[in-house]
Each structure stands twice: as structure tokens, then as C-alpha cells.
Image (cartoon, rainbow, N blue to C red):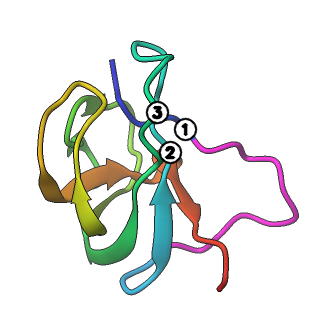
Amino acid sequence: MSVWKKADSAGPSPAVFGVGMQVVVRLDRNRYPDAAADDPSGVIVAAGELEGAALYAPVSGRETVWVVQFDEPFFGLDGSGPHASARVAQGSLEAAPEA
């Protein structure tokens, strides 16, 4: 099971992801519903594979994977970490709100 949650597709228009984009990684809290950790934020630093494994779970189908460098070290809901970066399926990413 993935620790990343697929971002909701509802909204005005889908984001166009790419290197340099600020993102929020939506965590899948199904296994850890009481976890108080915030969803980590960071910047996309590289393209990942079209198929393969994200940090915690296999990617099904041909979903794009991006390498995200976290703004600060991230500890997974399962206690793993700290992680400075991770390969994350695009479906778990959301454009960070503009400051």
C-alpha cells in the first residue's frame, strides 16, 4: 500500500508538472489515520521513470514518477526516515499554493 494519496482531480485545471515546480506530496493516511504529520512539500528536481517503484509502493500502469527534494527532512508515517528526497508518482503530487 502506498503512503502517498492520489491528489484529487477536482479543480479548475490540472497542473503541468515539471522540474523546478514547487509541490505538496499528499500522504495516504489509510494505514495511519491518526498521524499528525503534515504532508511534505518540496521541489521537483528530476524526472523519474514512467513505470517502476515510487519510494514506498509500486506504480501501476504508466504513471509518471518525479524526484522530489523535500524542503526539510521528511519522516514517513511509518516512522522511516529522515528522507531528503523521494521518487513520487505524479498522482500523489499537488501544486504548492503560491506564497
Asked if disc 2 and disc 1 are in contact, CB closer than 8 Å, the reply is yes
The residue that disc 2 covers is: 26
**Element at label 1:** loop
Ranked by sequence position, the earlier of labels 2 and 1 is: 1
Q: Residue at x 49, y 68 (%)?
A: 23
Residue closest to the far right: 12
- 41, 4: nearer the viewer: 41
Q: CA distance from mark 2 to mark 3?
A: 13 Å
Where residue 31 sits in the image (x, y, percent)? 40, 12
Q: Which residues are magenta?
A: 7-17
Where residue 83 sits in the image (x, y, percent)? 14, 53
Q: CA distance from mark 1 to mark 3?
A: 19 Å
**Element at label 3:** loop
Image quadrant for the N terminus?
top left
Ranked by sequence position, the earlier of labels 2 and 3 is: 2
- 34, 89: nearer the viewer: 34
Q: CA distance from mark 2 to mark 1?
A: 7 Å
